[in-house]
């Protein structure tokens, strides 16, 4: 599934005075989809900053899956995330 500007990441935390940002993004796309070059097309317009963290939740993964990425490039119409780190959750009980 491709990124949709109608379901963008949302800013969930920002340091006082415009410090470090943390964004959350929910999608059926996988971690490797998000780290494709310029996956997010409107990060600059949303106010994303270079080095902001993005917590991504794969809403249709089984078992549950999420990943943490960092914005490593941002410009007009482009936002690039790094490869990220997978965070998986298993429930063995």
Image (cartoon, helix red, strand yellow):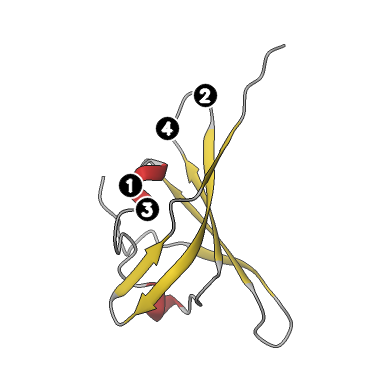
SS category of the residue bearing label 2: loop
Determine whether 72 is above or below 60 in the image.
below
Residue at horizontal 33 percent and vertical 47 percent from the top: 33
Q: Which residue is mark 2?
A: 63
Q: Which residue is mark 4?
A: 60
Label 4: how many Cα within 10 Å (few below 14, some 14–19, many 20+): few
Q: Which residue is mark 3?
A: 35
Residue at horizontal 44 percent and vertical 30 percent from the top: 61
**Quarter of the image holding residue 12?**
bottom right
Question: Which mark sits nearer the N-terminus, 3 or 4?
Answer: 3
SS category of the residue bearing label 3: loop
Label 2: how many Cα within 10 Å (few below 14, some 14–19, many 20+): few
Residue at horizontal 38 percent and vertical 58 percent from the top: 7
Q: Position of residue 20 (x, y in %)?
A: 65, 75
Circles 4 and 1 in contact, beta carbons < 8 Å: no
Question: Which mark sits nearer the N-terminus, 3 or 2?
Answer: 3
Please identify the quadrant where the N terminus is shown: top left
Circles 3 and 1 in contact, beta carbons < 8 Å: yes
Task: Report the residue that reaches farthest toward the bottom.
Answer: 17
Q: CA distance from mark 3 to mark 4?
A: 18 Å
The residue closer to the viewer here, 62 or 79, is 79
Please identify the quadrant where the C terminus is shown: top right
**Quarter of the image holding residue 73?**
bottom left
Circles 3 and 4 in contact, beta carbons < 8 Å: no
Say which of marks 3 and 4 sits in front.
3
Q: Position of residue 26 (x, y in %)?
A: 46, 49
SS category of the residue bearing label 1: helix
Residue 33 numbered mark, or none: 1
* 17 relative to 76 in the view: left or right: right
* 56 relative to 3 in the view: left or right: right
Q: CA distance from mark 2 to mark 1?
A: 18 Å
């Amino acid at each position: 599934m491709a990124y949709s500007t109608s379901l963008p990441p949302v800013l969930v935390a920002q340091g006082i005075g415009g410090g470090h940002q943390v964004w959350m993004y929910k999608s059926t796309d996988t971690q490797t989809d998000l780290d494709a070059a310029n996956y997010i097309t409107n990060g600059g317009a949303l106010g994303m900053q270079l080095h902001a963290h993005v917590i991504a939740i794969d809403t249709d993964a089984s078992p549950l899956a999420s990943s943490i990425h960092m914005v490593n490039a941002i410009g007009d119409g482009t936002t690039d995330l790094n490869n990220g780190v997978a965070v998986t959750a298993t429930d063995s009980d």
